[in-house]
Amino acid sequence: MAENTFDVVVIGGGPGGYVCAIRAAQLGFKVACVEKRGTLGGTCLNVGCIPSKALLSASEKFEEAGHGLAKMGVKVGGVELDLPAMMAFKDDVVKSNVNGVEFLFKKNKITWLKGHGRITAPGTVEVAGETTETVTASKAIVIATGSDVTPLPGLTIDETTIVSSTGALTLAEVPKRLAVIGGGVIGLELGSVWGRLGAEVTVVEFLDKILPTMDGEISKQMQRILGKQGMTFKLGTKVTGAVPGDSGVKLTLEPAKGGAAEELEADVVLVAIGRRPYTDSLGLDEVGVERDNRGRVKVDHHFQTNVPGIYAIGDVIEGPMLAHKAEDEGVVLAEQLAGQASHVNHDVIPGVVYTWPEVASVGKTEEELKAAGVAYKAGKFPFTANGRARAINMTDGFVKVLADARTDKVLGVHMVGPNVGELVSELCVAMEFGASAEDIARTCHAHPTLAEVTKEAALAVDGRALHM
Ligand code: FAD
Ligand code: NAD
C-alpha cells in the first residue's frame, strides 16, 4: 500500500481518536490519525482533564500545608506559593502525557498526519498542514474532533481577563477577585484551584442549583461545603453585560426570572457555561453528514453516521462530554470495524468532579427515577461515621445507593467525599454485573477503608447499616 492509503483514518487525536487509533492498529488495521494541534491527546491531555487535575492536586497540597494539617499536630510554617513553579509542574505533567501518546503511536505504527483534516468524499480526507495531501480510508473515516468552549454573547474571551478553561489554566498571577460564570464541573474545579490559591471566587449560575444535572442532594451538599471553603454563589442569576475596565471587568447580573440588576466587579472572569461539538471546516455539509439541533454528529448504535463509511465518537456526538466515554467509544468502534460484537453501556458511565471533597456519580439520580416513575429504595451513609475518614481528618460527604424497590438491583450511586472518584469504580463494576444492593452489602470490604461507606450505604438500603 502507498503512504497515503489507510484502512482507518481518524480525525482528531483526543481520548476518543487516539484510543480508537490504537485499538484499530492492535486489530491489524493500517491507521492514520489527523491532528492539527502540535501535540496529541486532544482537549483532555493538553487543556482539560490532565492540566486541571495537576493544578487541583498542587493547590490542594498548598491549602493543606497552609491550614489543614495543624489539627493533626503537624505545624507547617512559612508556606508560600510559587505560581510559576506550580505552572511548570502542570506543564511537565501535560508534556509527559502527550509525549506518551506519541510514543504509543510509534509503538503501534500509527501515522500521525499533522494538520487540519477535511472530509472531501466518503473514504477521502484532505490534510492541510505544512503541505496539503489527500489520504484515503478504505474501511472507515472516524470523526473524533471533540468539542470547544460555548461562548457567552456579550463577553469576548481574550484568555487573559475574560478566560475560558484554557486561559484559567495559565493565569500569570492569582486574581484577587475571580467571577466564574457557570456552576458546572469546570466552574467548580477551576474555581476551587484559584480559591485555594487566594482568589475571592463568586460563581454566577443561571439555574437555582450548582451541578444541576447531578443528584439534588449532591448539589445541596457541595454548595454547603464549597461555601464553607469561601466560594460565594449567585444562583438563579444571569450575566447581562460586561464592561472591561482598567483593572478587570464589571459584570451586570440580573435574576434569571427578572428583577433588579446588580454589579459584580472581578479581576478575571471565567466563562464555563458548557462546551459544544466542534466540526468547523470538516466538510460535513459537503459530504452530507447529518447533525442534530445541537450541532452533534448523528450516529446509530454502531457509531455510523448517515453516510456509509463515516463514523463519529466522543464529545462530537450525543452523551456526556467525558474522556472515558470517548475512549470506550473509540475502543468499541475499532472492535466493531474488525467484526467483533462490542458495545458501550451508556447507562454505566461514571461522572467525577475533582473538587475537595470529590463528587462521583453513576447511573440514575433520584430525580430521574422519580420522573420515570420507577419505585426505588435509597440507602445513605455519611463519612463522619467512618473510622478511616476520621483518621485522615476528611469526614465531609456521604454515599447514597439507589436500588430497585422490587428487585434490589442497583440503579444509581451518588457520592460526595474523600477519594470518591476512585471509590465509584467498584460501583461501576457492580452495576456492569447487574449487582443488587445486597451483593454489595455482602461483599467483604477491608477495614478501615473509605470503601466501607459504600458497603454501609448498601446495607442502609434495607435499614441495616451497622455503624449508624
Ligand atoms: P478532544 O479531546 O476535544 O479531541 C479532539 C481533537 O481533535 C483536538 O485535539 C483537536 O485539535 C482535533 N481536531 C478537531 N478538528 C480537527 C480537524 N478537522 N483536523 C484535525 N484535528 C482536529 N473529562 C473527563 O472525563 N474527566 C475530566 O477530569 C475532565 N476534565 C476536563 C477539564 C477541562 C478544563 C475540560 C475543558 C474538559 C475536561 N474533560 C474531562 C472533558 C474531556 O476533555 C473531553 O470529554 C474529551 O477530551 C473528549 O475527547 P474527544 O477525543 O472526543 O475530543
Ligand atoms: P457544565 O455543563 O458542567 O456546566 C455549565 C453550567 O453553566 C451549568 O450549571 C449551566 O446551568 C450553567 N450555565 C449555562 N448557561 C449559563 C449562563 N448564561 N449563565 C450562567 N450559568 C450558565 O459545563 P462546563 O463546566 O463548562 O464543562 C463542559 C464539559 O466539560 C462538561 O460537559 C463536562 O462533562 C466536561 N468536564 C468534565 C470534567 C470532569 O469530568 N471532572 C471536568 C471539566 C469539564
Image (cartoon, helix red, strand yellow):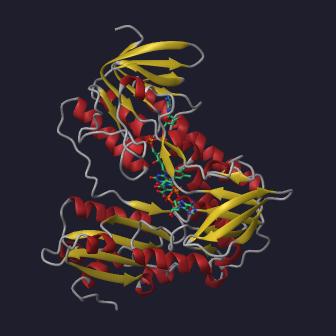
For the point 49% across and 31% down, the residue is: 103
Residue at image location 39% in from the left, 49% down from the top:
324
Does residue 242 appear to the left or right of 165 in the view shown? right
Quarter of the image where one finds residue 445: bottom left
Residue 77: give x, y in percent of width and height.
77, 74
The C terminus lies in quadrant? bottom left
| 310 on left or right of 163 | left
| Vertical arrangement, residue 48 with respect to residue 59, above or below | above
Q: Residue drawn 77% across and 61% down?
A: 267
In the depicted view, which residue is nearer to us: 181 or 418? 181
Report if residue 320 is visible in the image: yes
Q: Position of residue 68 (x, y in %)?
A: 64, 77
**Quadrant showing the N terminus:** top left
The answer to which image quadrant residue 458 occupies is: bottom left
318 or 76: which is nearer to us?
318
Going by the image, does 215 lie left or right of 443?
right
**Residue at the extreme top of the image, as rendered:** 2
Q: Is residue 154 above or below residue 138?
A: below
Q: Residue 270: percent from the left, percent from the top?
A: 65, 57
Q: Residue 199 falls in which quadrant of the image? A: bottom right
Residue 154 position in % (x across, y down): 67, 52
Residue depicted at x 23% and y 42%? 301
Residue lying farthest to the right in this orientation: 246
Q: Image check: 105 left or right of 48? A: left
Residue 419 appears anywhere in the view: no
